[in-house]
Image (cartoon, rainbow, N blue to C red):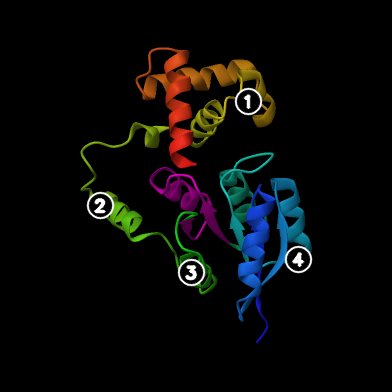
Amino acid sequence: MPKCKILVVDDHPIVRKGLAQLISQEPDIELCGDADNVTQALEQIAARHPDLVVVDMALKDSHGLELLAEIRSRFPDVRTLVWSMFDEKVYAERAIRAGAMGYVNKQESTQQLMDAIRLVLNGELYVSSQMTRALLRRVSGSTLLEQDPIQTLSNRELEVFEMIGNAMTTQQIARKLNLSPKTVEAHREKIKAKLNLANAAELSRRAVQWVLEGS
């Protein structure tokens, strides 16, 4: 039987190399390419026709959620799995809505990642047992009394919040997201309101803390 082809999209070369070595040891899957940004990833998918794309949330030129949506739109037969350091409680459901069939935190074992890859290749959805329980509570209506306010941020607001936590200025965020500085400032104000933060300094501290907790 031919091996299933895997494409890895991650902005860290060491991570891509390490995952390539893991995949090379597996009898039923093989690495067909890798990329560190959205443009390169889409070119690789078109050229190499992978069965599965493993995607990180943090990419050089964009965000993993945008790549997931692009893959679902342009390559609907290609399955995607997120492998990221970012908080599963915040990102897993967003990733699934964007088209991913699973979410694995990088703190989990490599065996768990391999298990997730095979489940997704078989057409099944993969999330951790903790996230499964959270999703079931939401479906049943028995949500937690105190929801993390960060989960109320939109995808774009979450991107801006993450970039603030990485010490990016309004102008830098605007350039990376192809937005006007005025629009970025509007997102900042909405984030402060949703997180009940009084000023820019509190916003920066909260964003930096969140990024450090997820790294």
The residue lying at 39 percent from left, 19 percent from top is 193
- Disc on the earlier residue, 1 or 2: 2
**Kind of residue indicated by mark 3:** Gln
Which quadrant, please, contains the N terminus?
bottom right
Whether residue 56 sits left or right of residue 131 in the image: it is right
* Residue on which disc 4 sits: 48
- Disc on the earlier residue, 3 or 2: 3
**Kind of residue indicated by mark 2:** Arg
Q: CA distance from mark 1 to mark 2?
A: 35 Å
* Residue on which disc 2 sits: 137
* Residue on which disc 3 sits: 111
Q: Is residue 198 above or below residue 79?
A: above
Q: Position of residue 7 (x, y in %)?
A: 67, 62
In depth, the one of 209 and 65 nearer the eye is 209
* Residue on which disc 1 sits: 173
Magenta-highlighted residues: 80-104
Q: Which secondary structure, mark 4?
A: helix
The residue lying at 44 percent from left, 63 percent from top is 126
Q: Residues within 10 Å of mark 4 (few under 14, many from 20)?
A: some
Marks 3/4 in contact by CB < 8 Å: the verdict is no
Q: Position of residue 8 (x, y in %)?
A: 65, 59
Q: Which secondary structure, mark 3?
A: helix
Q: Is residue 39 magenta?
A: no
Q: Which secondary structure, mark 2?
A: helix
**Kind of residue indicated by mark 4:** Arg
Q: Is residue 209 above or below residue 8?
A: above
